Image (cartoon, grey):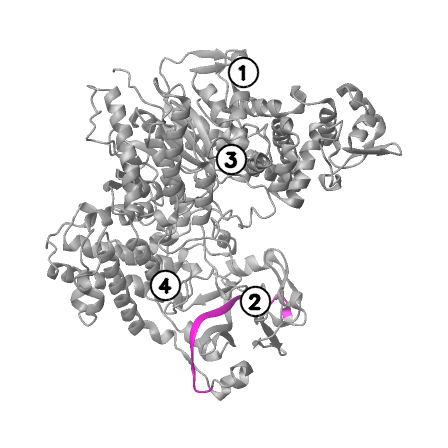
Amino acid sequence: MAEIKAPKKLIEVALPLDDINVASTRENYIYKGNPSAIHKWWAQRPIAAARAVLFAQMVNDPGGERGWYTGKSKQQADKEREELFDIIRELVKWENNNNEDLLNRAWQKIKNSWAETCRLNAGKPGFEESILPEFLDPFAGGGTLPLEAKRLGLRSNATDLNPIPVMINRALLQIPDIFKNREPISVKFERSEPEQLDSASDWSGVKGLARDVEYFGQDLLARAQASIGRYYPSIPVTETLINENPHLTGLAGQTLKVIAYMWARTVKSPNPAFNDVDVPLITSYMLSTKSGGEVYLEPIVGSRKFHFKVVTEKPKDITKAKMGTKLARGANFQCLLSEVPISSEYVQQQSKAGNLGYRMLAIAVEGPTGRTYISATYEAESLAKSAEPTWRPEVPFSGTSRYLGVKLFGMENISAIFTDRQTLALETFTGLVPEIFEISHQAAIEAGLSDDANSLEDGGRGAKAYAEAICLLLAFAIDKYSIYGNTLVTWYTKENRPSMLFSQNALPMAWDFIELNPFTNVGGGLSKSIKIVVDVVRELPRLGSAGVISQRSATEEHVVINPVISTDPPYYDNVPYSDLSDFFYVWMRRSLKTFFPKTFSTITTPKEAELVAFSHRHEDQNSAEAFFMHGMTKAMEKIANNSHPAYPVTIYYAFKQSDTKNYETASKGWETFLDAVLAAGLTITGTWPLRTERQGRTRSNQSNALASSIILVCHKKDDSASDISRREFQRELKTEMPLMLLAMTGGTTGQSPIAPVDLAQAAIGPGMAIFSKYGAVLNQDGSRMSVHDALILINRAITEHLSPESGNFDPDTQFCSSWFDQYGWSIGPFGEANVLAQAKGTTVDGVRIAGVVESGGGKVRLLKWSEYEADWDPTTDNRTPVWEACHQMIRSLNNQGESAAGELLAKMPEKGEPIRQLAYHLYTLCERKKWAEDARAYNELIGSWHAIVTASHEVGHSGSQAELGLDF
């Protein structure tokens, strides 16, 4: 085969990471119209990041292979690259999701790059300017990457083994492509509202379909209300109710709409004197912890009975109130009647013996004066327990208690996590979907869609397929309600609203739970769930087209030849996708099996072929790892052999904090994944850390959290690649890595330096580029070097480059760094300090004079940055080690901000680069020793570096910055 000439793509050279990260993080706070809201899936990437990565993957870098083309100056290349950055900066903005002028501009850049590539490969098959390569994601998941490829104008193909992602991608890609620019079929039912549906209405895109989903969703809701609404009655305010709830005074004769019922699980008391009494397991008596609006439960305990009274004031002992009947972590409580401890072991025994019950505690209601609470009533509890569903999802949970905490307490089937009334509601909703199909099918025929027998699953485009599309989207809304309509949902007392199941990748046990009224207008109710789906559909992109959406393993042959590939594969053992998705599958299958028989042919989602490394599916963890390695290698081989030769492949990997706890080690998941990528014949030419999570998430509070994703940029390895020795590999690392690290830590136009917390990830790119471009790196005994050993050597090269021991720092700084490594900010003996100082070519007295240590009484300690002199001036200090300059910069930044730090840097511009290098080194040292607070100071200094340098220029410093040109 003739050699393919492939211009280097923008993603292989530079990215405006800061802009992408800011937009990606912001996106997490936007729910309305967000494609990820259409249906729950795990570990979805932000559309901003996906769009930016795809665009940069598709457009040629203006600099060419050597940094600039013949006849084009480097300055011209930089200017053109900045123009591409500007497009990315606009593309990632949420407000521009459907800005067709901008999207067409981006599309034109993609087409121009393809045309240039075709001219370089004139006469070769597959390089026709008029036929752009298609896109494929073989691990389509939540559909983010295929959707953004479609938005950028490509024909987008998506495959996944799991039926839930297949349906999500049908909804995001296929349905809008088939049924765009149509008037809603429900118009015939709504002629009473002509102002909303006149001929001037905008039905572009899939707004007509969105309107139909809304209309038929309300129809389904009305039918359900007529069928089971009696189980969720509003509550009249009577004198009796006021007597029990004095805060309702003045509302007699009004009606309270139920938002949710508060329940607590119960077990038989372990006290023999009360062993016939069901006692509650309550984690908190607080119903509302909102400041000024506190509400709590007061237990009223008799000799053998108890009930709870709602009190609308702050409890005298709020700490005690927040404990409920809980004694300690886990399932450890005390008996409400006798105060005898209830151990976790006892609760498990009771649960597995079938003695786990539940008792109503209170009711959250909406009244004329707003949201409030009332005490539970016998009538309300009896009504709830009188529901009798005729169908239950009697499907066993697959998986272990590691992430299915409910299994520890006897809940072996999915049906066990729903009350009878919740089951009845979901049975009713899913059972009504076929009725909606019949009505909407007839309406679609009358609206002029072809009356054929072709289903959506088989490529239909007529009335039947349209009605199936409506039903699919309503099934999504029902699934969305189910996230709140189960017994694992708790009450968020700070905001007086239900929390959501799957806030973590697990099904944890809940002891006190809420039962949401499915007919409430509060978030989580079916009406709101329908609206969320409608809002997403209304905003789906109009550009591009849908290719094949099918259910298949990524290890099978691809559905399209030579596509551009960007994918987000499973991460070893991070998420048990199929085990968790059975929660949705049982209800979706009941709704849609008639219309999509092939997709829902199995009782549960596929497990055996899923590429994850969970030991419960194999003999042991080693077998699970071997399965993952074999399967992922096969999937990556399909990618390597089928991806378009003119484009790099981009692969997302979602890091856990534990994945790089120590620069000298790496997680098993990360190593195994890289092993699979390289064993498949791919070479890694770049890595980009993306920050895509909420800043306020639990894990990141008060920590230096890693970037949540890393993008691997890969190419198929040259079959003729030669082998090198371990020593040659180390020599090349030593030669090449410092230049790459300088580029990364220095930043470039439009991009801040890589943050210290992300450096180990980002530096994998140039390091693995060296490792993976050879056929093999051979150890002294002739064996092939493992990825594990390569990562150690790469990370060691980073440490050595940044370390003051590299010879780039003055003796005082070398002393301080070594002392800090050993003692931190603690006191150490003078004798050791004296020996160390002499070894570094300085003296303890010298570093004391420099103002960075305190020495006396046979003791020595380093001064913290907060102890440095506030009026320090480097122009009058005749002994200024880099250590002092670095910590003075931190002091200035923390106390006075970036402008003051810039003013300080302007007085010592020659120390700028050493300061930055030392900050990187000290960050890595602190992270290794788990000194999170100290690490943060160095990370923040680097994060503010560009702003500091800019501020230094404004006061007269005329320094220059290194450019980030990752020309691997």
809 on left or right of 142? right
Task: Point out the stretch of residues depicted in magenta.
Answer: 252-272
Q: Is residue 594 shown above or below 717?
A: below
Mark 3, other Cα within 10 Å: few <14 / some 14–19 / many ≥20: many
Q: Earlier in the sequence, mark 3 or mark 2?
A: 2
Question: Residue 488 — which label?
Answer: none
Q: Nearer the viewer, mark 3 or mark 2?
A: 3
Residue 139: percent from left, percent from top:
35, 38
Q: Earlier in the sequence, mark 4 or mark 3?
A: 4
Q: Which residue is mark 2?
A: 290
Residue 242: percent from left, percent from top:
51, 85
Q: Quadrant of the N terminus?
A: top left
Residue drawn 73% across and 22% down?
Answer: 811
Mark 1, other Cα within 10 Å: few <14 / some 14–19 / many ≥20: few
Q: Earlier in the sequence, mark 3 or mark 1?
A: 1
Which amino acid type is marked by label 4?
Lys
443 on left or right of 887? left
Which amino acid type is marked by label 1?
Thr
The residue nearer to you, when weighing 116 against 513, is 116
Which amino acid type is marked by label 2?
Lys
The residue nearer to you, when weighing 927 against 579, is 927
Q: Earlier in the sequence, mark 1 or mark 2?
A: 2
Q: Which residue is mark 3?
A: 752
Q: What distance separates the C-alpha of mark 1 from that of mark 2?
A: 59 Å
Q: Secondary structure at mark 2?
A: loop
The verdict on residue 269 being magenta is: yes
